[in-house]
Structure formats: C-alpha cells, structure tokens
Image (cartoon, rainbow, N blue to C red):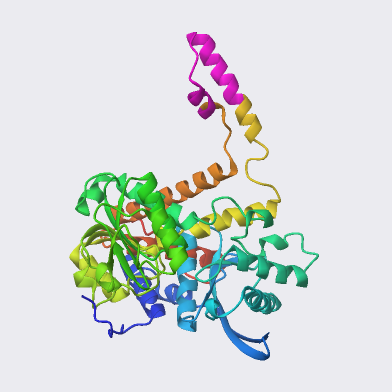
Amino acid sequence: MADATFKETMTFRECVDRMVDRAIIASDFDPNTAKIIQACNVVSQIKFPVKIGNKIEIFTGWWAQHSSHRLPVKGGLRFAPIVNQDEIEALASLMSYKCALADIPFGGAKGGLCINPANYSVSELREIAHTFGTELARKEYLSPALSVPAPDMGTSSREMVWIADAYKNMFPENLNQGACVTGKPLNRGGIPGRTEATGKGIQFGLREFFHHPDEVEAAGMEDGLTNKRVIVQGLGNVGYHTAKFLSEEEASLVIGVIERDGAIINPDGLNIHNLRQHFANTGGVKGFADGDYIENAASVLEMECDILIPAALESQIHANNAMSINAKLIVEAANGPVTYEADEILRHRGIKVLPDLYINAGGVTVSYFEWTRNLSHMRFGRLQRRYDEIRGTSYLQAIEELTGKKVSDQLRNDIVRGASELDLVRSGLDDTMRMAFRDMREVMKRNSKITDFRTAAYAIAVAKIAQSYYDMGLAEPPTDVTT
C-alpha cells in the first residue's frame, strides 16, 4: 500500500506541463508555439483585510489566467486551506485545455482563497467573499466579458451570489452583470442542471466509453455499466452525483466510498443517498450501518474494482501506489488526481484512464450554457417549447387517423411533451461528451504515436489553441493532429 510520507518529485503544475509535452512531441508541434501555449499569461496574488469579530485578518488569494486566446476566461474559484499559487496555475492551464477539447469558447483561468471555511460563520464568509469579489472586479478579474469564475472546492451557488453582488455594487449599470459568475441559484440567473453537471457529464462520458466494444474489451471488461464494481474517492458534489447517477440510473455497484475519515465498503453495493445523509449528519462515513468501515482510506484506492473514480484532490494516485492500483478503468472526476509519474506507470500497465481534461468537463460545459443564457436574458426553450408540443400533437393525431388506433397515455405524453430547459441542457452536455470522446478516438486511430486518451485530449486541445494564436499572428500554423 501507499507510503503516507511519500512526496512527489514534481509539482502539480510541472505534472500538467509534462503531460502537455508528451502530446506536443507525439504531434510534432512547433516548439516555439508550444512554449507560448504553456505559459501562464497572468498570475496575481491578492491580499485584503476583513474585520472578523474584534480583529482584522489579512486574507491571501490568487487569480491566474493561463490563456486569453478566447474571452472571457473561465475557471473555478476555490476556498480551501491548501490553496497555493502552483495549484492555481496548474488548474488554470487545465481549464484552457479542457475548454478547447470540449469546443467551449473560453480561455482558461482559476482562482483561490487560502481559507478554511469551517472556521468562519456565514456572515463572516459573506463579508470575506464580498471583499474578495470586489478586489477581483477592481482588477478586472471579474467581468461578464473578460473573466467569469464558478464554484469549486469550498464554494457553491451561495458564494457565487455574494461575489456577483460585489460586482453589481461596482457596476450597477452593466445590463449583463448576472453573467459575471456562473453556478448561481435558479432565482438569481442560474440554469437547471448546473449543480450536478460534472457528475452527469461523467455519467455521459462513461456511457460513451461503453458504446465502443473495442475500448471496453481493451480495458478487460464486458459491455455495459450494469453491475460494474465502482469505487469513488470523495463524497462532495462531484463524487456524490457521480456515484448517485451510476448506482441509480446505470445499475452499477458502488462498492466503496473513500472520505477524509476513512472508507465504507460493501461488495453488494452502497446506498449512496443514505450514505450522503449520514455524511451530512456526522461529517464523515464512519458509523454508516450498511457497510464495513476501513480506517486506512488510502488502502481502498488499491482494492480490486472495475472503475476507480478519484473525485477529491490532486495527486491521489502517484508513483508510490500506481503499481498497486487494481482497477480496470480510472475516471478522473477530480482535477489532476493522477500525477505524471503515476500516469506513465499506468500506461505501461495497460490501465485505461479517462483524463480530467475530458471526463470532468461537464461543469464548465453547463457553465457555458448558463453564461450564454444570462447574455441572452431568455431561458432556453421559451420560444419553441409550446410550438413543439403543438407539432407533436398534430403528428400523433395523424398517426392515429391513419392506423385507426389510439396510443397509450404514457406514449402520448412522451411524444407531445416539449423539451424543458433541463432537457436541453442535458442534451447539450451529452452531445459535448460524445463528440469529445469521438475526437480523441479519431486522433488515436490516425496518429500511431498517440495510444492513450490523455495524450489524445492534450493533442486536440493544443492544436486548437495553436490555431487561435496562429490566427492572431503569434504562432506557426498548427500541425494536423489527426494525421
């Protein structure tokens, strides 16, 4: 099992750069263009005071813009005690490549505040978030046209409202002020499906993987997600929704859940809803009645399973435990959960990895839908839903007249019902995940030097960003990665 004292030889940012290097070499990109693409354009440290009780505290945050080849730049805003500049730069670069792969017209960014939210009251957190938002807006790191944060670790729709209010106070005349952040509540310009978007995107991505028998066979599995044994690390927003969708809608068996205080395992499958309720009530998984508690949570990463889903922090699978991983498919629900060194080991072992760059793109995809909705000032489907219902009714009446038979009420409702906004959002998300997966497969088929999904994903992303720089006269023409 993993040695708790093990330290990686590369930082998170260095790991990302090495993965990009691998794709650049395999695709024969111009080295000078590669340097331009990898450079982080802006990194800003922000310090600001807030009165907490009877004393003044100084808080430190960062905002990084990896690439502004497309505007606005987009990235999550996290509140956590582990936040540091290297992490923020790495996550900003990941967001650039992720948006490019998914054909989302954003540049990549990331923000973070070094803070433990559990140490502050709601009113104190509101003041901290509002002040941070004001500082971001003052430096033009918060703007519907330039820079649009979203929820991340330690933040939610609540924090997004506080930050949006800070922007509104500074720029009350901006008609599009609601688009300065995404991940907002529905009553403040949010969009249905945003909260669970990353988990739903992971479900769609896995469905697409299992639609390709050659990939499934290469991973040593049989077709279909039904009864696949799944282990999930992390029961936060992403881990919970992923586990819930897989167990309830795909009939997969979530046999293990790993959290900070330990892990719960049940070979017959865990009830994710009940486990989440227990976690919310107790702050951990220990004591959950319908499973066996394992105190050494890291050891559960090495348990035999079909699908391992690290959905917590970066660098959870590293050079010291990669040889012990006993999964057939690793799904990177978190950002950077597999280090570069571990990825090299997993590739040589033949273990398939669906990379973060692809598989957790659901959040930014639906954020893009929310941003465009805010700019249009109209919910999706408002113009055509009733029209679609009328057309569906006409088609149904024609069928019944031609056949002389009546359809069932259930079928009638399915045919006649117009698409809701949630239907349209999920349709767009499903299409995004399908097309990105097929793009990766196409690259792997046409370029014999690219044999894994991660390298294929980076090759596609780098080529698209290079094309943008070429169009601006800043780079050599990009190589066609499909040849």
Q: Is residue 41 visible?
A: no
Residue at the farthest bottom position: 55
Residue 47 % position (x, y) = 62, 87
> Quarter of the image containing the C terminus?
bottom left
Residue 124 % position (x, y) = 64, 78
Residue positioned 48% across, 25% down in the render:
411
| Image-based side of 169 in relation to 397, left or right | right
Q: Nearer the viewer, residue 283 or 95?
A: 283
Q: Is residue 474 magenta?
A: no
> Quarter of the image containing the N terminus?
bottom left
Query: Quarter of the image holding residue 449?
Result: bottom left
Residue 333 % position (x, y) = 39, 62
Residue bounds of the magenta highlight: 391-414
Q: Is residue 237 visible?
A: yes
Q: Nearer the viewer, residue 180 or 69?
A: 180
Q: Identify whether 441 is placed above or below 260.
A: above
Q: Nearer the viewer, residue 102 or 59?
A: 59
